Image (tube, rainbow, N blue to C red):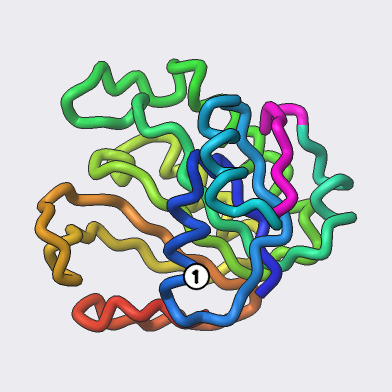
Amino acid sequence: MNVLELYSGIGGMHLSLNDSGIKGKIIASIEINNIANDVYKHNFPDTKLLNLNIEGISSDRINNMDVDTILMSPPCQPFTRNGLQNDMKDPRTASFLHILKILPNLKNITKILIENVKGFEKSDTRNILIETLKRSKFSYQEFILSPHQVGIPNSRHRYYCVAKKHQELLSFQVDEIKLCF
């Protein structure tokens, strides 16, 4: 897999990919936060890191990257159960909605992993995600998982969606937590 990492933060998705045993390389990462970018550069100095507002990236730019997979963890504040749950009314959702708008035009993207907070699964934004995946001919599965299910002493549930283009059915065993594309 040649991966574009959106909302890269300090590199949690990058580290997870490296530790997963799945063959893949982060070709480029995009993050707007300068402090997070400094940490990311320290952790992954050989990865092309773009300090960009995701709302400004075009489908043409992504199509010109040598990527077939997107990993992303969009801002969770609009969906958190303890927050205001403003969903699409929260301006922090705009960049993710932009990605969904251009997704049908991304010619080389065949695999997507999205992570967010528990609560995202009940949002209008999630409904737009699912409609966009279907319209773009992706099969998908959604999960609510807790780190303790994989031996990490934390019970913070998270939403995951894995999607693969041109497949009739995705099948993952939650108890295995080995998501093979």
Does 45 appear above or below 18? above
Identified at 44% across, 32% down, the residue is: 75
Q: Secondary structure at mark 1?
A: helix
Pick the front one: 117 or 50: 50
Q: Position of residue 166 (x, y in %)?
A: 64, 78
Relative vertical location of residue 99 with respect to residue 163 in this rendering, above or below: above
Question: Going 29% across and 76% down the picture, which residue do you hit?
Answer: 177
Q: Nearer the viewer, residue 90 or 1?
A: 1
Q: Position of residue 56 (x, y in %)?
A: 76, 28
Query: Disc 1 residue type?
Result: Asn
Q: Which residue is mark 1?
A: 18
| Category of crowding for the residue at label 1, using alpha-carbon neighbours closer than 10 angstroms: few (below 14), some (14–19), many (at least 20) | some
Which quadrant of the view contains residue 135? Answer: bottom right
Q: Is residue 108 visible?
A: yes
120 with respect to 132 (left or right):
left
Which residue is depicted at the point 43% across and 52% down? 12
- Residue 75 higher or lower than 137, as above or below: above
> Which quadrant holds the N terminus?
bottom right
Quarter holding residue 79? top left
**What range is drawn magenta here?**
47-56
Does residue 56 appear left or right of residue 138 in this picture?
Answer: right
